[in-house]
Image (cartoon, rainbow, N blue to C red):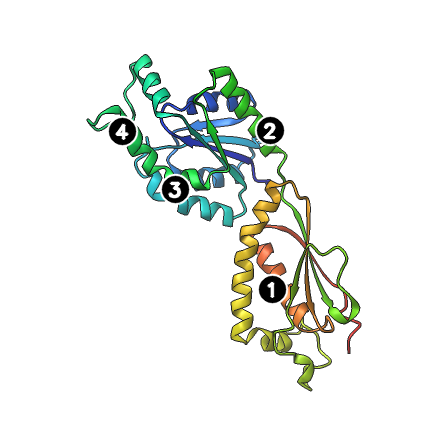
Amino acid sequence: MKNPNIIIITGLSGSGKSTAIDALEDSGYFCVDNLPVLLLPKFLKLHANSASQVQKVAFGMDLRQKEFVKNYHQIFHMLRREGYHFEVFFLECSEEVLVKRFSETRRQHPISEGTDLIGTIRSEKGQLKGLKEIADEIIDTSDLTVHQLKDVIIQHALQGVRVERMRISIISFGFKYGIPLEADLLIDVRFIPNPYFIPELKRLDGKDERVRRFVLKWDETREFLKKYFSLLEHLLPLYEREGKSYLTVAVGCTGGRHRSVTIAEDIYEHLRGEKREVVLKHRDIELSE
């Protein structure tokens, strides 16, 4: 089942999170407020295993749940590695306006522990600083009416709905035959020792297990793959956020038969493990001898 479009509403108490949740619900989102972050993976797995047609979900999460700050980073990172795309909307507001809102409603700050209101607000801001830094959208509600805030949330949500997972192509090639014109990301793996100069490997290609063992046995190869996987993990969501639909990763060695084929195969398998939509092509594997 296709992963749903997910929005997480968080931020300062009194900044309008309930209004944001209401706006998303009015826009057709299935909304759950005050969900413990530790239950988020279970909720999404239950959704994936059900026959539900709901494809837009939103969660309200904040310091009302005492374990939120301790666990959100680990949970968010794990979900992204499992292929879930979600956006975090962080709502904030000036101290002056927050004090006014709490005074007008006579509502107690949800994390108040006997300290004055300004001290509580500042404590909450400090605890949520790291979350604000990783948020996809930061929305200052200080000067927004309820209706304006709803409009802003809906506009941001509609942008998120248009975000789709990219289609990724992995191409191995030989530099001696030219660089693929469609390449977006280009990797030169000629730093890896060349199996071409090993007599028993020369006429094989990078899909053969004997060549694979040779290419992958070097420390520099394994370290390169580790760092390149990390780079892709960082870049792919950023390209998707910008609306990029297609991405071609070109992996080159001298002839396109040994090293580039093995490395392209490993990148392909890694991305498949990340549940990415990915295809693999070995452009020059039959050209080199």
Q: Which amino acid does label 1 sit on?
A: Asp
Q: Name the residue under label 2.
A: 158
Q: Which of marks 4 and 1 is in front?
A: 4
The amino acid type, in three-letter code, at marker 3 is Gly
Q: Mark 3 points at which residue?
A: 130
Image quadrant where one finds the C terminus: bottom right
Residue at x 68% of width, y 81% of height: 201
Q: How far, Cα to Cα, is label 3 from label 1?
A: 34 Å
Mark 3 and mark 2 lie on one chain; the one further toward the N terminus is: 3
**For residue 266, which numbered disc appears in the image?**
1
How far separated are the C-alphas under marks 2 and 1?
A: 36 Å
Alpha carbon of mark 2 to alpha carbon of mark 4: how far? 34 Å
Mark 3 secondary-structure assignment: helix
The amino acid pointed to by label 4 is: Thr
Sequence-wise first label, 4 or 3: 4
Apparent side of residue 92 relative to residue 280 in the rendered image (left or right) = left
Mark 4 burial class by Cα count in 10 Å: few <14, some 14-19, many 20+: some
- Give the quarter of the image for residue 72: top left
Q: Nearer the viewer, mark 3 or mark 1?
A: 3
Could you say which quadrant of the image residue 245 lies in? Answer: top right
